Amino acid sequence: MTSTANSPLSTARTGSPRRYQHCPHPVTLSPPLSLSPAPGSPSPAHPGSPQGLEEGISQITSKSSVSPTTLVWNFPIDITFKSTNPFGWPQIVLSVYGPDFFGHDVVRGYGAVHVPFVPGRHKRTIAMFVPESTSRLQQLTSWFTGRRPEFTDPRVVARGEGREVTRVRSQGFVTVTFNVMTKDLHKLGYDVGQGPQGLHQA
Amino acid sequence: MAELHLIGQIESGCGFSERRLFCKWGLHAGAGWTLLAGAGAGQTHLDEPQAGEAAQWGHPLDLHLGTRGLQGWPRLLLEVWHVDTWGRRGLAGYGVCAVPSAPGCHRVTVVTWRPRGTRRQRLLGPGGPELRDPLGTATAATERFRLRTESAGTVRLRLGVVARHMARYGVAL
């Protein structure tokens, strides 16, 4: 699915798409999925010019007898970023929605991951989670009204600050495939290593 | 000044005897290192996993460090805590790991341990002892021999390391 790459100067990305979610619940999900770059990430190259969409919404998908456990979006992304500093490296933010028993769209999961900076093809499995109410009363009212807590701005999942006040339930995973190319990283003195490394035991 | 970027995620924790877990983290480095940008410590959300046993945190890390020397290479100190349904929290494990010294993307598995209480504390049930000074005890090697510990779960991280100008100072990574 996605791609994006980026490098301190400019990178080109192409994406080859394949993402799905699988969810442990017996309900059928039909999630449109939206993605947006994380706050503080480098701006897309030449803002204003067509260097890729920063946000999108997928189709609504459902499981089938061929693929009873996974939801296939197969959603293509192609985006280019540029920056002079890797700090604030872009992340992809996913929010998955699906209808509840009454047909209302409710959030089924939020998740975020950094775009890999090593050139090549990378696959990332993102654990998705939903926020929980912190008070028992809110939990009760949300059970009655069917309204689950949501983030007003899903991009908070790409930020590390203020998380200690959040309670979540993790449920399901989304897989994203990245094809990453970088340009002029080395010229700026950066060394990003080569390829994915093995498992390190600490 | 040579620079180091640490970009990644505290992904998950598994193998702990408790389920509702969060993780406190902090990056600690020697005196020659400066944190140029980003948060050097933080805390993940509290996760109650519905799928599987692992607590999923997906906590982003993005740090920019500068250094004048290699001594005191940065280390991450992780503290995993659990919270029971009454909101009481107890220690689940400590773990420390060095930031990988090779540029690139690394999957790091940190094994954790926790102090083993006295027999009386163990009989009294959950809420075992904590370290008064986790930083000094967990990251320093000098005081460890006083501790009696037991093994706890593991924390998985994905750490991307980008080095800058290390070669200019003759440092091979």
Image (tube, helix red, strand yellow):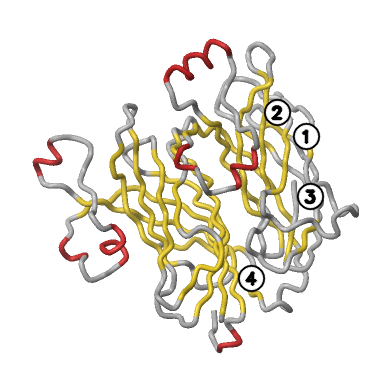
Q: Chain of mark 1?
A: A
| Secondary element type, mark 1 | loop
Q: Which residue is under mark 1?
A: A58
| Secondary element type, mark 3 | loop
Q: Looking at the image, do the residues carrying marks 4 and 1 touch, with CB atoms under 8 Å apart?
A: no
Sequence-first disc among 4 and 2: 2
Residue A113 vs residue A142, the one in the foreground: A142
Q: Quadrant of residue A49?
A: bottom right
Residue A13 appears at what percent x and percent y?
80, 57
Marks 3 and 1, how far apart at CA: 15 Å
Q: Is residue A153 left or right of residue A4?
A: left
Q: Which residue is under mark 3?
A: A16
Marks 3 and 2, how far apart at CA: 20 Å
Q: Which residue is under mark 2?
A: A31
- Point out the frontmost of discs 3 and 1: 1
Q: Amino acid at mark 1?
A: Ser
Q: Is B125 placed above or below B10 here?
A: above
Q: Amino acid at mark 3?
A: Ser
